Image: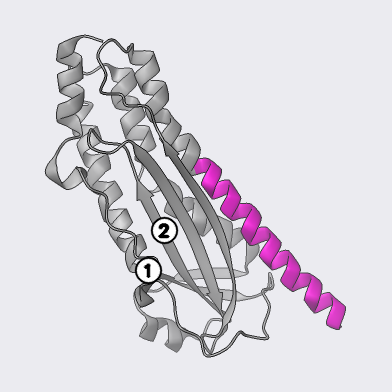
C-alpha cells in the first residue's frame, strides 16, 4: 500500500475521541437491577416487554456514532482506497447491533417497547422488564482488540430476576497500519469486525430462544 494511502488511513481513525472506547462497567448498578430474590415467573411468547438501555449501551451507541461519522468523512478522502473506507463504514454501523437485538426480542414476545427511564416503564406495567446492556470496541491505530458484548437481563414486574440472554465476541486483529499490505487484505481484516459482531449477535439469538423455550416448556408442564 502506498505511504500516502497509509497516512490517509491513519488520519481517518486517530482522532482523540476515537482512540479509546468507553470503559465497560461490568458491575455498575446502571447495567442491572439488584433483585431481592429470583423470580418464580418464566418467559412466554405472549408477554409484553419493556426495555431499558444501560449506561453501557448509551455510551456505546454514542461511541459507534462518532466512529461511524469519522469513517464516513474518511470515505470522502480520495487518497484512501474505497475498499478500505467501505470496510470501516460497514463495520462501524451504529444501528446494526441495536436493531438486531430489538428484532430478536420482537420475534420472541408479543410486544417490545423501549422506555427512556424506569419511572415511565413502571407506569406502563409491562409483563417483563429487560435491561439491555451492550458494549463494542473497534480497531484504531492505538487499539487492535475487537470486542462486542450483548446481554439482555430479564426481570418480572417486581424487578425480580428471571434470567439472561447473551452473546460475546472478541479477537485481537492483525494491525492494518503496516507498510506493504495490499488494500484487499486490509479491507478483509477490517471487515472481520462486522463478522465477529454478527456472530456474537447470533449467539444472543440462540441464547434468547433457549431462555424463552425453557419458559414455555415449564408453562406447558404445569398446565
Specify the segment rendered in magenta: 198-223
Marks 2 and 1, how far apart in space? 8 Å
Q: Residues within 10 Å of mark 2 (few under 14, many from 20)?
A: many
* Nearer to us in this view, 68 or 110: 68
Image-quadrant location for residue 3: top left
Rendered position, 153 above or below 19? below
* Nearer to us in this view, 118 or 179: 179
Q: Mainly helix, strand or loop, the magenta region?
A: helix
Residue at 20%, 34% in the rendered image = 13
Residue at 28%, 38% in the rendered image = 143
Is 70 inside the magenta-drawn segment?
no
Dot 2 or dot 1: first in sequence order is: 1
Residue at 62%, 85% in the rendered image = 39
**169 relative to 54 in the view: left or right:** right
| Residue 34, image x, y percentages | 46, 83
Residue of label 1: 54
Is residue 110 shown to the viewer in this render? yes
The C terminus appears in which quarter of the rendering? bottom right
Residue 134 — which label?
2
The local secondary structure at tag 2 comes to: strand
Rendered position, 132 above or below 135? below
CB-based contact (under 8 Å), mark 2 and mark 1: yes
The local secondary structure at tag 1 comes to: loop
* Nearer to us in this view, 65 or 135: 135
Amino acid at each position: 500500500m502506498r505511504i500516502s494511502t497509509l497516512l490517509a488511513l491513519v488520519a481517518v481513525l486517530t482522532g482523540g475521541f476515537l482512540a479509546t472506547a468507553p470503559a465497560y462497567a461490568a458491575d455498575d448498578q446502571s447495567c442491572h437491577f439488584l433483585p431481592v430474590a429470583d423470580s418464580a415467573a418464566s418467559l412466554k411468547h405472549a408477554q409484553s416487554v419493556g426495555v431499558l438501555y444501560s449506561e453501557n449501551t448509551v455510551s456505546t451507541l454514542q461511541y459507534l456514532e462518532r466512529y461511524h461519522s469519522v469513517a464516513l468523512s474518511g470515505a470522502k478522502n480520495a487518497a484512501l482506497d474505497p475498499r478500505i473506507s467501505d470496510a470501516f463504514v460497514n463495520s462501524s454501523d451504529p444501528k446494526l447491533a441495536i436493531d438486531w437485538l430489538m428484532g430478536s426480542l420482537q420475534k420472541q414476545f408479543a410486544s417490545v417497547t423501549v422506555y427512556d427511564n424506569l419511572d415511565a416503564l413502571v407506569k406502563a406495567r409491562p409483563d417483563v422488564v429487560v435491561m439491555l446492556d451492550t458494549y463494542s470496541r473497534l480497531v484504531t491505530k492505538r487499539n487492535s482488540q475487537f470486542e462486542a458484548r450483548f446481554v439482555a437481563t430479564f426481570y418480572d414486574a417486581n424487578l425480580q430476576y428471571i434470567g439472561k440472554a447473551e452473546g460475546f465476541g472478541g479477537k485481537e486483529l492483525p494491525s492494518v497500519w503496516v507498510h506493504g499490505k495490499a488494500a484487499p487484505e486490509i479491507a478483509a481484516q477490517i471487515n472481520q469486525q462486522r463478522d465477529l459482531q454478527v456472530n456474537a449477535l447470533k449467539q444472543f439469538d440462540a441464547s434468547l430462544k433457549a431462555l424463552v423455550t425453557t419458559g414455555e416448556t415449564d408453562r406447558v408442564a404445569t398446565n
